[in-house]
Image (cartoon, rainbow, N blue to C red):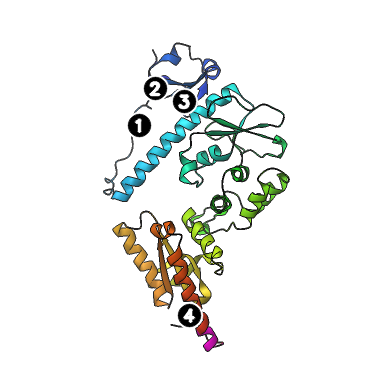
Protein backbone atom coordinates (compact mmCIF):
# COMPACT_ATOMS: atom_id res chain seq x y z
CA UNK A 1 0.00 0.00 0.00
CA UNK A 2 1.28 3.44 -0.88
CA UNK A 3 2.13 5.82 1.89
CA UNK A 4 0.14 9.07 2.13
CA UNK A 5 3.13 11.02 0.88
CA UNK A 6 2.90 9.23 -2.48
CA UNK A 7 -0.63 10.39 -3.12
CA UNK A 8 -0.97 12.67 -6.19
CA UNK A 9 -0.68 16.26 -5.03
CA UNK A 10 -3.40 17.59 -7.35
CA UNK A 11 -5.99 15.28 -5.75
CA UNK A 12 -5.29 16.22 -2.14
CA UNK A 13 -7.18 19.48 -1.70
CA UNK A 14 -10.71 18.61 -2.84
CA UNK A 15 -12.91 15.58 -3.45
CA UNK A 16 -12.25 13.70 -6.68
CA UNK A 17 -14.03 11.09 -8.77
CA UNK A 18 -12.96 7.52 -9.28
CA UNK A 19 -12.30 8.35 -12.93
CA UNK A 20 -9.93 11.16 -11.94
CA UNK A 21 -8.10 8.83 -9.56
CA UNK A 22 -7.67 6.14 -12.19
CA UNK A 23 -6.48 8.75 -14.70
CA UNK A 24 -3.85 9.82 -12.16
CA UNK A 25 -2.53 6.27 -12.01
CA UNK A 26 -4.20 5.10 -8.79
CA UNK A 27 -5.70 1.64 -8.58
CA UNK A 28 -9.07 0.62 -7.22
CA UNK A 29 -7.39 -0.94 -4.20
CA UNK A 30 -5.56 2.34 -3.50
CA UNK A 31 -8.95 4.01 -3.08
CA UNK A 32 -9.68 1.60 -0.23
CA UNK A 33 -6.59 2.67 1.72
CA UNK A 34 -6.79 4.18 5.18
CA UNK A 35 -5.96 7.68 3.94
CA UNK A 36 -8.83 7.80 1.41
CA UNK A 37 -12.47 8.31 2.40
CA UNK A 38 -15.46 7.63 0.18
CA UNK A 39 -17.77 10.64 0.43
CA UNK A 40 -20.36 9.63 -2.16
CA UNK A 41 -21.03 7.32 -5.06
CA UNK A 42 -17.80 7.34 -7.06
CA UNK A 43 -16.43 10.34 -5.12
CA UNK A 44 -13.50 10.28 -2.69
CA UNK A 45 -11.41 12.59 -0.53
CA UNK A 46 -7.79 12.16 0.53
CA UNK A 47 -7.58 12.37 4.33
CA UNK A 48 -3.89 11.71 4.77
CA UNK A 49 -1.32 13.96 6.39
CA UNK A 50 1.25 15.84 4.31
CA UNK A 51 4.86 14.93 4.94
CA UNK A 52 6.86 16.90 7.50
CA UNK A 53 8.08 20.32 6.54
CA UNK A 54 10.66 22.55 8.11
CA UNK A 55 9.56 25.95 9.27
CA UNK A 56 11.68 28.72 10.73
CA UNK A 57 11.59 28.96 14.48
CA UNK A 58 9.68 31.88 15.92
CA UNK A 59 8.65 33.25 19.25
CA UNK A 60 5.82 31.35 20.94
CA UNK A 61 2.39 32.85 20.29
CA UNK A 62 0.77 35.07 22.87
CA UNK A 63 -1.63 33.29 25.24
CA UNK A 64 -5.11 33.00 23.77
CA UNK A 65 -7.89 34.97 25.43
CA UNK A 66 -11.31 33.36 26.09
CA UNK A 67 -12.71 35.26 23.10
CA UNK A 68 -9.84 33.97 20.93
CA UNK A 69 -10.54 30.40 22.00
CA UNK A 70 -14.27 30.77 21.39
CA UNK A 71 -13.64 32.24 17.95
CA UNK A 72 -11.16 29.48 17.08
CA UNK A 73 -13.61 26.77 18.17
CA UNK A 74 -16.38 28.39 16.12
CA UNK A 75 -14.13 28.63 13.06
CA UNK A 76 -13.12 24.97 13.40
CA UNK A 77 -16.77 23.89 13.56
CA UNK A 78 -17.58 25.99 10.51
CA UNK A 79 -14.59 24.61 8.60
CA UNK A 80 -15.64 21.03 9.36
CA UNK A 81 -19.19 21.78 8.24
CA UNK A 82 -17.92 23.32 5.00
CA UNK A 83 -15.77 20.26 4.27
CA UNK A 84 -18.81 18.03 4.70
CA UNK A 85 -20.83 20.29 2.42
CA UNK A 86 -18.11 20.31 -0.24
CA UNK A 87 -17.95 16.51 -0.13
CA UNK A 88 -21.71 16.19 -0.54
CA UNK A 89 -21.76 18.71 -3.39
CA UNK A 90 -19.04 16.80 -5.23
CA UNK A 91 -21.12 13.65 -4.84
CA UNK A 92 -24.15 15.44 -6.32
CA UNK A 93 -22.04 16.79 -9.17
CA UNK A 94 -20.72 13.31 -9.94
CA UNK A 95 -24.31 12.15 -10.50
CA UNK A 96 -25.56 15.37 -12.12
CA UNK A 97 -22.61 17.09 -13.85
CA UNK A 98 -24.81 19.87 -15.26
CA UNK A 99 -25.68 21.47 -11.91
CA UNK A 100 -24.21 24.69 -10.50
CA UNK A 101 -23.87 25.52 -6.81
CA UNK A 102 -25.81 28.64 -5.79
CA UNK A 103 -27.90 30.24 -3.04
CA UNK A 104 -27.12 29.43 0.57
CA UNK A 105 -24.69 26.65 -0.38
CA UNK A 106 -22.61 29.06 -2.46
CA UNK A 107 -22.86 31.75 0.23
CA UNK A 108 -21.56 29.36 2.87
CA UNK A 109 -18.64 28.35 0.66
CA UNK A 110 -17.90 32.02 -0.05
CA UNK A 111 -18.06 32.82 3.67
CA UNK A 112 -20.79 35.43 3.20
CA UNK A 113 -22.80 36.50 6.26
CA UNK A 114 -25.92 34.42 6.77
CA UNK A 115 -28.39 34.18 9.65
CA UNK A 116 -27.67 31.33 12.06
CA UNK A 117 -30.49 29.14 10.71
CA UNK A 118 -29.12 29.38 7.16
CA UNK A 119 -25.53 28.93 8.30
CA UNK A 120 -26.47 25.73 10.15
CA UNK A 121 -28.66 24.32 7.38
CA UNK A 122 -27.49 21.09 5.74
CA UNK A 123 -29.70 21.55 2.67
CA UNK A 124 -27.71 21.85 -0.56
CA UNK A 125 -28.83 24.38 -3.17
CA UNK A 126 -28.04 23.92 -6.86
CA UNK A 127 -29.16 25.36 -10.19
CA UNK A 128 -30.23 23.39 -13.23
CA UNK A 129 -31.38 24.54 -16.63
CA UNK A 130 -35.04 25.29 -17.33
CA UNK A 131 -36.87 22.25 -18.66
CA UNK A 132 -34.81 19.74 -16.68
CA UNK A 133 -36.02 17.78 -13.69
CA UNK A 134 -35.00 18.57 -10.13
CA UNK A 135 -32.24 16.42 -8.67
CA UNK A 136 -33.87 13.53 -6.79
CA UNK A 137 -31.10 13.38 -4.19
CA UNK A 138 -32.19 13.69 -0.57
CA UNK A 139 -31.29 17.00 1.04
CA UNK A 140 -30.78 18.76 -2.31
CA UNK A 141 -32.88 21.73 -3.36
CA UNK A 142 -32.88 22.33 -7.11
CA UNK A 143 -33.75 25.65 -8.69
CA UNK A 144 -34.52 25.62 -12.40
CA UNK A 145 -33.27 28.67 -14.25
CA UNK A 146 -32.32 30.01 -17.65
CA UNK A 147 -28.60 29.38 -17.37
CA UNK A 148 -27.85 31.93 -20.10
CA UNK A 149 -28.84 34.57 -17.53
CA UNK A 150 -26.53 33.14 -14.89
CA UNK A 151 -22.91 34.17 -14.37
CA UNK A 152 -20.45 31.75 -12.81
CA UNK A 153 -17.32 32.63 -10.90
CA UNK A 154 -14.38 32.39 -13.34
CA UNK A 155 -12.62 29.74 -11.27
CA UNK A 156 -14.16 26.71 -9.52
CA UNK A 157 -14.49 27.01 -5.76
CA UNK A 158 -13.26 23.89 -3.95
CA UNK A 159 -13.37 22.26 -7.37
CA UNK A 160 -17.06 23.13 -7.80
CA UNK A 161 -18.82 25.32 -10.38
CA UNK A 162 -20.39 28.12 -8.36
CA UNK A 163 -22.39 31.23 -9.18
CA UNK A 164 -20.65 34.60 -9.07
CA UNK A 165 -20.84 36.74 -5.95
CA UNK A 166 -23.63 38.85 -7.47
CA UNK A 167 -25.64 35.87 -8.73
CA UNK A 168 -25.24 34.11 -5.39
CA UNK A 169 -26.66 37.24 -3.72
CA UNK A 170 -29.56 37.33 -6.16
CA UNK A 171 -30.51 33.69 -5.61
CA UNK A 172 -30.51 34.26 -1.85
CA UNK A 173 -33.55 36.49 -2.43
CA UNK A 174 -35.67 33.32 -2.55
CA UNK A 175 -34.82 32.61 1.08
CA UNK A 176 -33.78 35.78 2.92
CA UNK A 177 -35.90 38.80 3.87
CA UNK A 178 -34.80 42.20 2.60
CA UNK A 179 -32.82 43.20 5.70
CA UNK A 180 -30.69 40.04 5.66
CA UNK A 181 -30.22 40.35 1.91
CA UNK A 182 -28.94 43.89 2.50
CA UNK A 183 -26.37 42.52 4.96
CA UNK A 184 -25.01 40.17 2.28
CA UNK A 185 -24.99 43.02 -0.23
CA UNK A 186 -23.12 45.26 2.20
CA UNK A 187 -20.44 42.59 2.50
CA UNK A 188 -20.10 42.32 -1.27
CA UNK A 189 -19.66 46.05 -1.89
CA UNK A 190 -17.48 46.68 1.16
CA UNK A 191 -14.06 48.07 0.30
CA UNK A 192 -11.17 49.03 2.55
CA UNK A 193 -8.81 51.20 0.51
CA UNK A 194 -6.46 51.82 3.45
CA UNK A 195 -5.97 48.07 3.75
CA UNK A 196 -5.81 47.49 0.01
CA UNK A 197 -9.07 45.49 0.01
CA UNK A 198 -11.37 45.84 -2.98
CA UNK A 199 -15.07 45.06 -3.07
CA UNK A 200 -16.08 41.51 -3.93
CA UNK A 201 -18.73 42.96 -6.25
CA UNK A 202 -19.47 46.66 -6.64
CA UNK A 203 -22.94 48.15 -6.99
CA UNK A 204 -22.67 48.30 -10.79
CA UNK A 205 -22.18 44.51 -10.86
CA UNK A 206 -25.28 44.04 -8.68
CA UNK A 207 -27.28 46.30 -11.01
CA UNK A 208 -26.13 44.29 -14.04
CA UNK A 209 -27.23 41.10 -12.29
CA UNK A 210 -30.67 42.54 -11.55
CA UNK A 211 -31.06 43.58 -15.18
CA UNK A 212 -30.18 40.07 -16.35
CA UNK A 213 -32.72 38.56 -13.96
CA UNK A 214 -35.57 40.90 -14.86
CA UNK A 215 -38.88 39.08 -14.53
CA UNK A 216 -37.45 36.20 -12.52
CA UNK A 217 -38.66 35.17 -9.09
CA UNK A 218 -36.99 37.17 -6.34
CA UNK A 219 -36.00 40.16 -8.45
CA UNK A 220 -38.42 42.56 -6.70
CA UNK A 221 -37.01 41.66 -3.28
CA UNK A 222 -33.43 41.82 -4.55
CA UNK A 223 -34.04 45.24 -6.08
CA UNK A 224 -35.48 46.52 -2.80
CA UNK A 225 -32.41 45.22 -0.98
CA UNK A 226 -30.04 46.74 -3.53
CA UNK A 227 -31.50 50.19 -2.90
CA UNK A 228 -30.43 49.87 0.76
CA UNK A 229 -26.95 48.40 0.18
CA UNK A 230 -24.08 50.67 1.28
CA UNK A 231 -20.31 50.42 1.31
CA UNK A 232 -18.86 50.72 4.81
CA UNK A 233 -20.53 48.16 7.07
CA UNK A 234 -17.97 45.92 8.73
CA UNK A 235 -20.50 43.38 10.01
CA UNK A 236 -24.13 42.27 9.61
CA UNK A 237 -24.76 43.77 13.06
CA UNK A 238 -23.77 47.21 11.79
CA UNK A 239 -26.09 46.74 8.82
CA UNK A 240 -28.93 45.78 11.18
CA UNK A 241 -28.32 48.90 13.27
CA UNK A 242 -28.29 51.18 10.22
CA UNK A 243 -31.54 49.72 8.95
CA UNK A 244 -33.13 50.02 12.40
CA UNK A 245 -32.27 53.73 12.49
CA UNK A 246 -33.82 54.21 9.06
CA UNK A 247 -36.94 52.22 10.00
CA UNK A 248 -37.31 54.49 13.04
CA UNK A 249 -37.42 57.53 10.77
CA UNK A 250 -33.99 58.85 11.72
CA UNK A 251 -31.65 60.33 9.10
CA UNK A 252 -29.37 57.87 7.34
CA UNK A 253 -26.03 57.72 9.15
CA UNK A 254 -22.65 58.00 7.50
CA UNK A 255 -20.55 54.83 7.67
CA UNK A 256 -16.93 54.62 8.80
CA UNK A 257 -16.76 58.20 10.06
CA UNK A 258 -13.12 59.27 10.28
CA UNK A 259 -11.63 61.85 12.62
CA UNK A 260 -7.94 62.73 12.63
CA UNK A 261 -6.07 63.51 15.84
CA UNK A 262 -2.24 63.51 15.99
CA UNK A 263 -2.46 62.64 19.68
CA UNK A 264 -4.09 59.38 18.59
CA UNK A 265 -2.12 58.59 15.43
CA UNK A 266 -0.32 60.47 12.69
CA UNK A 267 -1.01 57.68 10.21
CA UNK A 268 -4.52 56.45 10.94
CA UNK A 269 -7.75 58.26 11.83
CA UNK A 270 -10.04 57.24 14.63
CA UNK A 271 -13.11 55.67 13.06
CA UNK A 272 -16.72 55.33 14.17
CA UNK A 273 -18.81 52.52 12.71
CA UNK A 274 -21.70 54.90 12.04
CA UNK A 275 -22.29 58.54 12.78
CA UNK A 276 -23.76 61.93 12.06
CA UNK A 277 -20.96 64.38 11.35
CA UNK A 278 -23.34 67.34 11.24
CA UNK A 279 -24.44 66.72 14.83
CA UNK A 280 -21.19 65.18 16.09
CA UNK A 281 -22.68 61.84 17.04
CA UNK A 282 -20.48 58.75 16.74
CA UNK A 283 -21.96 55.25 17.04
CA UNK A 284 -19.75 52.26 17.85
CA UNK A 285 -21.04 48.69 17.58
CA UNK A 286 -19.11 46.61 20.09
CA UNK A 287 -19.59 43.01 19.06
CA UNK A 288 -17.70 39.86 19.96
CA UNK A 289 -14.13 40.45 21.09
CA UNK A 290 -14.68 43.96 22.40
CA UNK A 291 -14.55 42.68 25.99
CA UNK A 292 -10.90 41.70 25.56
CA UNK A 293 -8.76 44.03 27.77
CA UNK A 294 -6.43 44.94 24.89
CA UNK A 295 -9.36 45.73 22.62
CA UNK A 296 -11.10 47.70 25.37
CA UNK A 297 -7.99 49.89 25.70
CA UNK A 298 -7.92 50.49 21.94
CA UNK A 299 -11.62 51.32 21.87
CA UNK A 300 -11.19 53.77 24.74
CA UNK A 301 -8.35 55.58 22.97
CA UNK A 302 -10.34 55.68 19.73
CA UNK A 303 -13.49 57.04 21.36
CA UNK A 304 -11.50 59.66 23.24
CA UNK A 305 -10.63 61.26 19.89
CA UNK A 306 -14.31 61.93 19.23
CA UNK A 307 -15.01 63.02 22.79
CA UNK A 308 -12.16 65.55 22.76
CA UNK A 309 -13.72 67.05 19.63
CA UNK A 310 -17.08 67.42 21.35
CA UNK A 311 -18.78 64.36 19.89
CA UNK A 312 -21.29 62.19 21.70
CA UNK A 313 -20.17 58.55 21.51
CA UNK A 314 -23.00 56.00 21.58
CA UNK A 315 -21.90 52.43 22.25
CA UNK A 316 -24.10 49.59 21.05
CA UNK A 317 -23.87 45.91 22.00
CA UNK A 318 -25.45 42.63 20.98
CA UNK A 319 -27.87 42.92 23.89
CA UNK A 320 -29.13 46.19 22.36
CA UNK A 321 -29.72 44.35 19.11
CA UNK A 322 -31.72 41.65 20.87
CA UNK A 323 -33.90 44.45 22.26
CA UNK A 324 -34.49 45.79 18.76
CA UNK A 325 -32.11 48.74 19.32
CA UNK A 326 -34.95 50.54 21.12
CA UNK A 327 -32.69 52.24 23.66
CA UNK A 328 -30.12 53.18 21.03
CA UNK A 329 -32.77 54.69 18.77
CA UNK A 330 -34.22 56.73 21.64
CA UNK A 331 -30.78 58.03 22.66
CA UNK A 332 -29.81 59.04 19.12
CA UNK A 333 -33.20 60.63 18.47
CA UNK A 334 -32.83 62.70 21.65
CA UNK A 335 -29.27 63.72 20.77
CA UNK A 336 -30.22 64.83 17.25
CA UNK A 337 -33.14 66.85 18.61
CA UNK A 338 -30.87 68.62 21.12
CA UNK A 339 -28.30 69.46 18.47
CA UNK A 340 -30.97 70.73 16.11
CA UNK A 341 -32.19 73.07 18.84
CA UNK A 342 -28.63 74.32 19.25
CA UNK A 343 -28.39 74.93 15.50
CA UNK A 344 -31.64 76.88 15.54
CA UNK A 345 -30.47 78.99 18.49
CA UNK A 346 -27.07 79.75 16.94
CA UNK A 347 -27.61 79.97 13.17
CA UNK A 348 -24.43 80.05 11.15
CA UNK A 349 -22.23 78.94 14.04
CA UNK A 350 -20.40 75.62 14.10
CA UNK A 351 -21.68 73.06 16.56
CA UNK A 352 -19.71 73.03 19.83
CA UNK A 353 -20.49 71.42 23.14
Check residue 53 in the rendering and tell me which mark sits there, or answer none.
1
Q: Give the foreground label among 4 and 3.
A: 4
From the viewer's perspective, is 59 left or right of 175?
Answer: left
* Mark 3 → mark 1, Cα distance in angstroms: 15 Å
User: Which residue is drawn at the image coordinates 51% and 54% (left, top)?
Assistant: 196
Does 170 appear above or below 18? below
Could you say which quadrant of the image residue 331 lies in? Answer: bottom left
From the viewer's perspective, is 69 left or right of 351?
Answer: left
Which of pointers 4 and 3 lies earlier in the amino acid sequence?
3
- Residue 311 visible somewhere in the drawing: yes
Q: Callout 1 environment at 10 Å: few (<14), some (14 to 19), or many (20+)?
A: few
Q: Which residue is mark 4?
A: 338
Q: Secondary structure at mark 1?
A: loop
Q: Which residues are magenta?
A: 342-347
Check residue 321 in the rendering and tell me which mark sits there, or answer none.
none
Could you say which quadrant of the image residue 135 lies in? Answer: top right
Q: Secondary structure at mark 2?
A: helix
Cβ atoms under marks 4 and 2 closer than 8 Å: no
Q: Give the foreground label among 2 and 1.
A: 2
Which of pointers 3 and 1 lies earlier in the amino acid sequence?
3
Q: Which residue is mark 2?
A: 5
Amino acid sequence: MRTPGEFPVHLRDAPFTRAAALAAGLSGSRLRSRDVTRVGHGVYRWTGTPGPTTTPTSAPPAPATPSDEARRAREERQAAARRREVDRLHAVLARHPDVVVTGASAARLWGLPLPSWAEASTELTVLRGDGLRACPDAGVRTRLADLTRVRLHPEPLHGLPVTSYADTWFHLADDLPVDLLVAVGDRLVRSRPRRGEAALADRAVLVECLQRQRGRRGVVRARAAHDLVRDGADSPQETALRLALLDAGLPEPELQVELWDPAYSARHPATADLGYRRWRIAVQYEGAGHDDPVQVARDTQRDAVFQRAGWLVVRVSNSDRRAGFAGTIALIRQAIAARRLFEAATPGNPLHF
